[in-house]
Amino acid sequence: MEILYLVLAMIVVGFIVSYIAGLIWKDDFNNYPTAIIASVITGLLDWFVIPMIVSSETLKWIGVALEPPLVALGVLWLIRYSKKNQ
Protein backbone atom coordinates (compact mmCIF):
# COMPACT_ATOMS: atom_id res chain seq x y z
CA MET A 1 0.00 0.00 0.00
CA GLU A 2 2.94 2.32 0.63
CA ILE A 3 3.96 2.08 -3.02
CA LEU A 4 0.56 3.40 -4.09
CA TYR A 5 0.94 6.36 -1.76
CA LEU A 6 4.43 6.95 -3.12
CA VAL A 7 3.24 6.99 -6.75
CA LEU A 8 0.35 9.32 -5.90
CA ALA A 9 2.70 11.63 -3.99
CA MET A 10 5.15 11.68 -6.92
CA ILE A 11 2.30 12.58 -9.30
CA VAL A 12 1.44 15.51 -7.02
CA VAL A 13 5.12 16.47 -6.89
CA GLY A 14 5.22 16.35 -10.70
CA PHE A 15 2.25 18.71 -10.92
CA ILE A 16 3.82 21.14 -8.44
CA VAL A 17 7.20 21.09 -10.17
CA SER A 18 5.64 21.60 -13.59
CA TYR A 19 3.66 24.56 -12.28
CA ILE A 20 6.81 26.07 -10.80
CA ALA A 21 8.69 25.44 -14.05
CA GLY A 22 5.95 27.29 -15.91
CA LEU A 23 6.53 30.27 -13.64
CA ILE A 24 10.30 30.11 -14.13
CA TRP A 25 10.38 29.60 -17.90
CA LYS A 26 7.86 31.54 -19.92
CA ASP A 27 7.29 29.40 -23.02
CA ASP A 28 4.62 27.19 -24.54
CA PHE A 29 6.18 23.88 -23.50
CA ASN A 30 3.80 21.42 -21.79
CA ASN A 31 5.58 20.63 -18.52
CA TYR A 32 3.11 18.26 -16.89
CA PRO A 33 3.77 14.86 -18.53
CA THR A 34 7.54 15.28 -18.45
CA ALA A 35 7.69 16.37 -14.81
CA ILE A 36 5.27 13.65 -13.67
CA ILE A 37 7.16 10.88 -15.46
CA ALA A 38 10.53 12.12 -14.16
CA SER A 39 9.18 12.39 -10.59
CA VAL A 40 7.54 8.96 -10.55
CA ILE A 41 10.57 7.17 -12.03
CA THR A 42 13.00 8.90 -9.68
CA GLY A 43 10.77 8.29 -6.66
CA LEU A 44 10.46 4.59 -7.45
CA LEU A 45 14.19 4.26 -8.03
CA ASP A 46 14.89 5.94 -4.71
CA TRP A 47 12.33 3.78 -2.94
CA PHE A 48 13.90 0.53 -4.12
CA VAL A 49 17.60 1.37 -4.57
CA ILE A 50 18.44 3.40 -1.45
CA PRO A 51 17.52 0.53 0.95
CA MET A 52 19.92 -1.73 -0.98
CA ILE A 53 22.76 0.72 -0.41
CA VAL A 54 22.05 2.05 3.11
CA SER A 55 19.87 0.52 5.81
CA SER A 56 18.61 3.87 7.10
CA GLU A 57 14.87 4.54 6.79
CA THR A 58 15.48 8.23 7.36
CA LEU A 59 17.87 8.45 4.41
CA LYS A 60 15.35 6.64 2.21
CA TRP A 61 12.60 9.14 3.06
CA ILE A 62 14.93 12.12 2.60
CA GLY A 63 15.96 10.80 -0.82
CA VAL A 64 12.36 10.17 -1.86
CA ALA A 65 11.34 13.65 -0.68
CA LEU A 66 14.15 15.71 -2.20
CA GLU A 67 15.46 13.97 -5.29
CA PRO A 68 12.32 13.66 -7.51
CA PRO A 69 11.54 17.41 -7.60
CA LEU A 70 15.17 18.24 -8.31
CA VAL A 71 15.40 15.64 -11.08
CA ALA A 72 12.12 16.83 -12.64
CA LEU A 73 13.37 20.43 -12.69
CA GLY A 74 16.68 19.24 -14.13
CA VAL A 75 14.96 17.29 -16.90
CA LEU A 76 12.76 20.26 -17.79
CA TRP A 77 15.79 22.53 -17.86
CA LEU A 78 17.71 20.08 -20.10
CA ILE A 79 14.80 19.95 -22.55
CA ARG A 80 14.69 23.74 -22.77
CA TYR A 81 18.46 23.99 -23.03
CA SER A 82 18.59 21.52 -25.90
CA LYS A 83 15.72 23.25 -27.71
CA LYS A 84 17.44 26.62 -27.32
CA ASN A 85 20.77 25.34 -28.70
CA GLN A 86 19.43 23.64 -31.81
Image (cartoon, grey):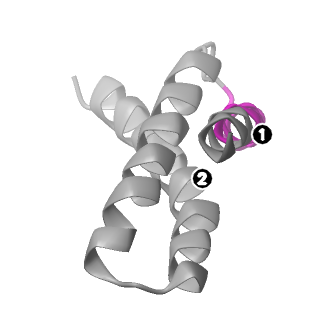
The crowd level at tag 2 (other Cα within 10 Å; few <14, some 14-19, many 20+) is: many
Kindly check if marks 1 and 2 are in contact, taking CB atoms under 8 A apart as contact: yes
* Magenta stretch encompasses residue 13: yes
Residue 2 on image: x %, y %? 67, 47
Camera-nearest residue between 23 and 59: 59
- Residue type beneath disc 1: Ile
SS for tag 2? Answer: helix
Q: How many marks?
A: 2
Q: Which residues are magenta?
A: 10-26
Above or below residue 36? Residue 10 is: below
Locate the N terminus by quadrant: top right
Numbered badge on residue 16: 1
- Residue type beneath disc 2: Pro
- Label 2: which residue? 69
Locate the C terminus by quadrant: top left
- The part of the image, by quadrant, that contains residue 15 is top right
* Magenta stretch encompasses residue 16: yes
Residue 38 on image: x %, y %? 46, 36
Residue 85 on image: x %, y %? 25, 31
